[in-house]
């Protein structure tokens, strides 16, 4: 395994034995054997070809805001683009951002250039790549409304695909059906606006989040997708689960669609609480709650 570390480090900066709990916003997860930070598309291509040749499993990871990892060791490679592949270029009303760029920082940069359209993303703790992958959204807007093209690495080739080819849907995209594809960058088309008005809107929404969401505690963000015509938090409130906990995992007192890591929660605590909520909501309302959260490294 020492030889593998050396070979990986020859391709790109590599670290070993890093807890996934340090790479996810819910602060849960076992050790990842290797974490690799390619600094450009050439290094990424070389890395992926090497891993496939060696038969080593790998996983792309952004800020880990929608990820629930098991507590088991991941004997593979985590690939992260948020250290080096973070460049941003403004071109008129368009912004081209590499996948590792922070979506919050990008929203702020856009505001400073009087560009509107990313206000909804100013509180989403993720990367551009992760936001495209999840079709992240808030306040009745989403990435699908601003993405015009995505630069994708797939089948050994790098190519731009347009918005329609991304298969965007509510908290979904074609990339979720093709985890072997890697998002490298996205072109977003924004609109000219008034800088002061954009800034005020972002600040107002920040204050609303502070008042309504448990931002001081580790979480995955919203756990469940809203069913058609319903709010997931209201269904969870309806089964009396506000503040309910299993082990160290607890339904937030502030917002029922957040499950927080209240006290050193295990991955099993968190997943058990998800399953229990789904069962209770199904029993009372006949509604199957679907998660936004992606499970990783579970048997």
Image (cartoon, helix red, strand yellow):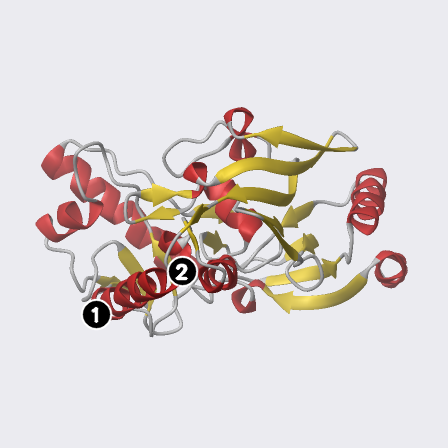
In this orientation, does residue 247 appear?
no
Task: Specify few, some or many for label 2: CA neighbours under 10 Å numbering under 14, 14-19, or 20 or more.
Answer: many
Q: Residue at x 80, y 64 (%)?
A: 13
Figure check: 42 above or below 34: above
Q: Is residue 56 visible?
A: yes
Task: Give the label on residue 122, or none.
Answer: 2
Q: Residue at x 64, y 48 (%)?
A: 59
Residue at the disc numbered 1: 211
Vertical placement of residue 2 versus 156, above or below: below
Asked whether disc 1 touches disc 2, contact meaning CB atoms under 8 Å apart, the reply is: no
Left or right of 196? Residue 135 is right
Q: For residue 219, what is the image quadrant?
A: bottom left
**Viewer-nearest residue: 18 or 11:** 11
Tell me the quadrant of the picture where the N terminus can be found.
Answer: bottom right
In this image, 167 relative to 38: left or right? left
85 up-or-down from 140: above or below: below
Quarter-of-image position of residue 278: top left
Viewer-nearest residue: 281 or 164? 164
Instruction: Report helix, strand or loop for mark 1.
Output: helix
Residue 84 placement (x, y as % from top left): 71, 62
Within 10 angstroms of label 1, few (less than 14), some, or many (20 or more) residues?
few
Q: Is residue 40 left or right of residue 27?
A: right
Residue at 51% x, 25% y is 164
Residue 286 vs residue 215: left or right? left
Nearer to me, 54 or 39? 39
Whichever of callouts 1 and 2 sits on the residue coming sooner in the sequence is 2
| Disc 2 secondary structure class | loop
Give residue 213's position: percent from left, percent from top: 26, 65
User: Of 91 and 78, which appears nearest the observer?
Assistant: 91
Real-space Cα separation, disc 1 to disc 2, in angstroms = 16 Å
Residue 132 x %, y %: 51, 43
């Amino acid at each position: 395994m020492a030889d593998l570390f050396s070979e990986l480090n020859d391709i790109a900066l590599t670290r070993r034995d890093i807890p996934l709990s340090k790479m996810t916003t819910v602060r849960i997860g076992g050790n990842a054997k290797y974490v690799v930070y390619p600094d450009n598309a050439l290094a990424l291509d070389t890395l992926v070809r090497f891993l496939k040749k060696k038969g080593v499993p790998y996983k792309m990871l952004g800020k880990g805001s929608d990820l629930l990892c098991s507590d088991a060791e991941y004997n593979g490679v985590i690939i992260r683009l948020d250290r080096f592949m973070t460049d941003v270029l403004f071109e008129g009303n368009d912004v081209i951002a590499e996948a590792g760029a922070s979506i919050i920082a990008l929203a702020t940069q856009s505001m400073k250039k009087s560009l509107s359209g990313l206000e909804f993303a100013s509180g989403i703790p993720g990367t551009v790549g992760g936001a495209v992958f999840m079709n992240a959204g808030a306040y009745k807007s989403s990435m699908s409304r601003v993405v015009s093209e995505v630069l994708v690495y797939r089948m050994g080739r790098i190519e731009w695909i347009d918005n329609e080819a991304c298969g965007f849907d509510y908290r979904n995209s074609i990339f979720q059906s093709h985890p072997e594809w890697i998002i490298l960058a996205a072109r977003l088309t924004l609109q000219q606006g008034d800088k002061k008005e954009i800034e005020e809107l972002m600040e107002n929404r920040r204050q609303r989040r502070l008042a309504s969401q448990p931002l001081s505690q580790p979480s995955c963000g919203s756990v469940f997708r809203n069913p058609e015509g319903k709010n997931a938090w209201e269904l969870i409130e309806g089964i009396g689960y506000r503040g309910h906990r299993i082990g160290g995992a607890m339904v937030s007192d502030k917002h029922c669609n957040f499950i927080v890591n209240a006290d050193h929660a295990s991955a099993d605590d968190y997943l058990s609480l998800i399953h229990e909520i789904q069962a209770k909501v199904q029993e009372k309302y006949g509604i199957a709650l679907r998660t936004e959260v992606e499970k990783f490294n579970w048997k």
